[in-house]
Image (spheres, grey):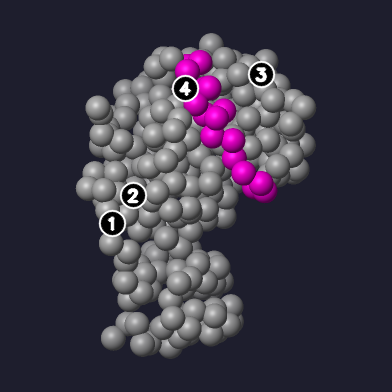
Amino acid sequence: MESLYHPVKIGNVELKGNLFLAPVAGYSDAAFRSVCIENGACFTYTEMVSAEALVRKNLKTETLMKRACNEKAYAVQIFGGEPEIMAQAAKIVVEKTHCEVIDINCGCPVPKIIKTGAGSALTREPEMLFKIAKAVVEAVESTPVTVKIRSGWEQKQITWREAAQAALDAGVSAITIHPRTRAQGYEGHSDWSVMKELVKMVNNRVPVFGSGDLFKPEDARDMLLQTGVSGVMFARGAMGNPFIFKDATSLLTDGAYQPVPPDVRVKTGFIELERLVAETNEKHACMEMRKRFSAYSKGIQNGALLRAKIVHAATVQDYADIFADFLH
């Protein structure tokens, strides 16, 4: 029997393993992706980038898609509702980043994204999904294109089959599914049986990756066993816990893992802070790291007291003072 942890191919891109960091809006910047890679992530995705903003030469958008310092292979995720704009944006991404994969967001449930005909709106409109995916595939030729879909718009409108078929017909190199509906957002439970059905339907033509409710290493093992997906994507489960990749790798290969001690958690947070300061500036990085250090401090003794201070931290020195006991 093939090991649950194994290499994966996305088109012409070969990856050593099948544990990925999902695209997470407002979180998966280069600094966070870099610490995930250091802790065993086999492939990473940028947060979603607006195709419209790229075509209009928005500079802030360009920083979202920069390669991390240690990123050998990564995907830039783009969103938009118009085939021509998406094709233009994909070309810009490849020219500027030389990223290994372009991912199309067909799953975001946020109203302002859906209003533009992007995100989950595309899972509901397979014809448009096909047009967009085909336009992007043709625009970037040798760069593999992948899509991320949801199970449907709402419980009465389950459209993942049509969406997946449209993506396959357009020539994508992999499909990721988050088996919740747009109406569910991130509430309730993701329906892993949908993943299993999708794997059966795709029938090895391209890899299928699973996302949704992966909060601990055992969840990754269970998803791989129960659904037959080729790989799994951690999203919220990796927030403040980039160690989930290392732990899941150990669980899948050796059957057990050792949780990371509190001082290592804190020191990893400081590595992320340092890189974020270098990428942006101290003020922005320190504001951004409030939510991230709050996540790093979960499960640490007196974590609640630490978090009460974290939410006021404004400088690197503030964080150093808060975590002084862990840094020496």
Assess disc 1: are there few (<14), some (14-19) or many (≥20) residues with their C-alpha within 10 Å of its C-alpha. Answer: some
Q: Amino acid at mark 2?
A: Ala
Query: Horizontal placement of 15 versus 286: left or right?
Result: left
What amino acid type should be assigned to the residue bearing mark 1?
Tyr
Quadrant (top left, top right, bottom left, bottom right) of the N terminus: top left
* x 57%, y 15%: residue: 165
What residue is disc 4 on?
A: 199
Using the rendered view, name the quadrant where residue 57 is placed.
Answer: top right
Secondary structure beneath disc 4? helix
Q: CA distance from mark 3 to mark 4?
A: 18 Å
Marks 1/2: CA distance?
8 Å
* Residue located beneath label 2 in the image: 248
Of discs 3 and 2, which sits in the foreground?
2
Span highlighted in magenta in the image? 186-202
Sort mark 4 into few (<14), some (14-19) or many (20+) by Cα contacts within 10 Å. many
Q: Which residue is mark 3?
A: 126
